Image (tube, rainbow, N blue to C red):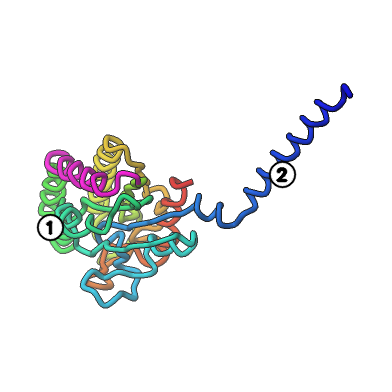
């Protein structure tokens, strides 16, 4: 008789453990817990310019960009890809955040480079004089510290308003250049150096505003180190294509951006 309470307790414990193990083994329960509704916002560095081939829209979206690569590898529940080449912060707010909802669980974005005049700066440095390049870089840096923080704040706030339950990951831009020998027709070491310094400043500003918004910043610069323009195995395009110039190639998205994103998602 004295053993019966102990026997009943052991039986109950076994039943609880069996039920827990059985629940963990139910595929449907695991799937529901891991549901990911992913939306990839942003500019050309998210849409995949440089990787090709592109969809039939005017946004130059490529399935070789980091976002569709990550979505395919993780079998997400849903994936939306409104990122668009040439986008500025206002475009994200006006045209892209409408794809978000309370059911969105993950949002990634690259934005801010076009606001700071990326194309004009690159053109000035690639084809202009040293002084013209310096002036363009200094103007972009002044914008990055003056006007851009407010634009980023408004963009991240718009994302939060539309997708309050989502994790927001802000990816930065890589340094575009290696600064070693690059041939007679390349940009000078000085030009490449100040452009990389501008990229560092932009990364710092973006990381700061992302943190202020409660977002996670993914720094891509370490992943592209040694693979910029002028590297033996570059992951950034030079002037091989007018639209694609100074954007990652397919390797850049797969081996640069994708690992940077994966590292912060965990």
Report how many numbered discs are placed on residues in the image. 2
Label 2 sits on residue: 18
Identify which residue is drawn at 31% across, 60% down.
Answer: 46
Could you tell me residue 155's position as x and y percent? 20, 47
- For the N terminus, the quadrant is top right
The range drawn in magenta is 145-165
Disc 1 target residue? 129
Q: Residue at x 35, y 52 (%)?
A: 103
Q: Secondary structure at mark 2?
A: helix
Q: Residue at x 87, y 21 (%)?
A: 2
Does residue 232 appear anywhere in the picture?
no
* 96 and 216: which is toward the camera: 96
Q: Which residue is most to the front?
A: 1
Q: Camera-side residue: 50 or 28?
A: 28
In this rendering, position of residue 126 left or right of residue 248: left
Q: Are marks 2 and 1 in contact (CB under 8 Å)?
A: no
Q: Label 2 neighbourhood size at 10 Å, few (<14), some (14-19), many (20+)?
A: few
**Drawn side of residue 30 relative to residue 184, left or right:** right
Residue 32 image position (x, y, % from top left): 50, 53
């Amino acid at each position: 008789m004295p053993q019966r309470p102990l026997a009943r307790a052991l039986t109950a414990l076994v039943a609880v453990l069996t039920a827990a193990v059985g629940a963990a083994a139910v595929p449907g329960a695991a799937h529901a817990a891991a549901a990911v509704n992913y939306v990839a916002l942003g500019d050309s560095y998210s849409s995949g310019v440089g990787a090709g081939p592109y969809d039939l829209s005017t946004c130059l979206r490529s399935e070789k960009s980091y976002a569709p690569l990550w979505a395919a590898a993780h079998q997400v529940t849903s994936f939306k890809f409104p990122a668009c080449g040439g986008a500025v912060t206002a475009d994200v707010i006006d045209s892209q955040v409408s794809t978000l909802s309370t059911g969105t669980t993950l949002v990634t974005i690259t934005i801010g480079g076009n606001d700071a005049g990326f194309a004009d700066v690159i053109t000035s440095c690639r084809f202009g004089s040293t002084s013209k390049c310096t002036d363009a870089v200094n103007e972009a840096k002044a914008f990055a510290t003056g006007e851009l923080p407010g634009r980023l704040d408004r963009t991240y706030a718009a994302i939060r308003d539309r997708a309050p339950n989502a994790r927001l990951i802000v990816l930065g831009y890589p340094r575009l250049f290696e600064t070693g020998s690059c041939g007679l027709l390349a940009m000078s070491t000085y030009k490449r150096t100040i452009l990389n310094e501008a990229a560092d400043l932009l990364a710092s500003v973006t990381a700061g505003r992302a943190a202020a918004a409660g977002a996670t910043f993914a720094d891509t610069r370490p992943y592209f180190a040694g693979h910029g323009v002028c590297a033996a195995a570059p992951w950034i395009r030079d002037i091989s294509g007018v639209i694609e110039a100074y954007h990652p190639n397919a390797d850049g998205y797969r081996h640069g951006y994708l690992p940077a994103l994966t590292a912060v998602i965990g």
